[in-house]
Image: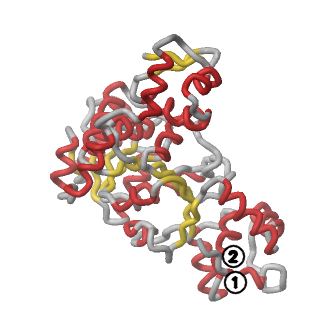
Amino acid sequence: MPWSEERMRLLWLSAAEITADRVQRLLEKYTAAQGIWDAFQGAQSPNFKDGSRAVLERLHSLAALEDLIAKLDKKRIRCLFRDDEEYPELLQSINDPPYLLYCAGDLSAFRRPVVAVVGTRDPSRYGREMALSVARELAEVGVCIVSGMARGIDSCAHEGALKAGGVTAAVLGSGLNVCYPPENRSVLRAIVAKEGVAVSEYPLDAEPHTYHFPHRNRLISGLSHGVFFVEGKRQSGGMLTVASALAQGREVFAAPGQIGTIGSEGPHAIIREGARMVTCAKDILDDLSLDLERFRPAVETAEAAPSPGRQSIVEALRRGPLTLDELSKATGCSAQFLLTELGVMEIMGQVRKEKGNLFFLA
């Protein structure tokens, strides 16, 4: 990817977590990111918060930015700018699209029809099963499932898509180098390895600050043709995503739940206001009228047979439980490759990991 001066200056602003709406205002004032860079250490410098200014000062040199670019390259992180051909078309249409997206994985995921599945971090058994089944059914016919990698409904949505052999996209509220929650690290690896993609507008090592997540939710809806809200309170992150979806002109769907339960408050409220009620994936497919024909064969091929690497893992574990190092010696596969494959197999219920980092066939 060519790094023009303007792109390097936008990377500089992003590294300090300068928001998309603030950058837009600055670009209007200074004409270009280069103008912000030139004015930074002079009398006409914009006002920045102390933390952001410290980062901008530290990176205000060509050498510092080249080091940052080298780090991104080493991690295989793609920086996607708004004028890039692969920048998601749906995201271009929202009010404050990110001027820079950090991406890991296959960006062609966003050329598919996309549905977001969102909800509470503390779902009921019904909520978990609803998220898993609908995400799986949608992924089976070629829909890309978008969610936010959080505990609860988000995790179920990603896992449902992976179990179908389908494609899913994770929108993080942290940098791509910081998996949150940590226990979803294997899910994140599996998403990136299996034709999916992880994206964030936050710099590589950004921590998952509370204020990131409401801002992140506009990307979940912005990347999607429709948003399916499974469970959540009236005041919740899921409701914020629904509000973003409505502002962006996206279709909104909700699962009916048991009357009087906390998790049903949000879905029932938006159903009363006109959201479309969902009992299965077909309800969403019928309402969105998505063109899926060219995506079906890819999904069917993906789930037709286990990969040779996965088959060698199964054969090794048939002889008994093994640690990662032992499994690497038995299969001849690298530890990094095994972590990705084992993550997928664990999600699909084929292996389990127990104390001592021992892997067993399920």
Residue 13 on image: x %, y %: 68, 70
Residue in the picture at 77% in, 84% down:
39
Q: Is residue 35 above or below residue 171?
A: below
Q: Is residue 244 above or below residue 354?
A: below
Residue 233 seen by the camera:
no
Numbered disc 1: secondary structure: helix
In the displayed structure image, the side of residue 22 where residue 37 appears, left or right: right
- Judging depth in this view, the residue of 51 and 354 nearest the camera is 354
Residue 242 on image: x %, y %: 37, 53
Label 2 environment density (alpha carbons within 10 Å; few <14, some 14–19, many ≥20): many
Numbered disc 2: secondary structure: helix
Amino acid type at circle 2 is: Arg
| Residue beneath disc 2 | 9
Residue in the picture at 77% in, 64% down:
67
Marks 2/1 in contact by CB < 8 Å: the verdict is yes
Label for residue 34?
Answer: 1
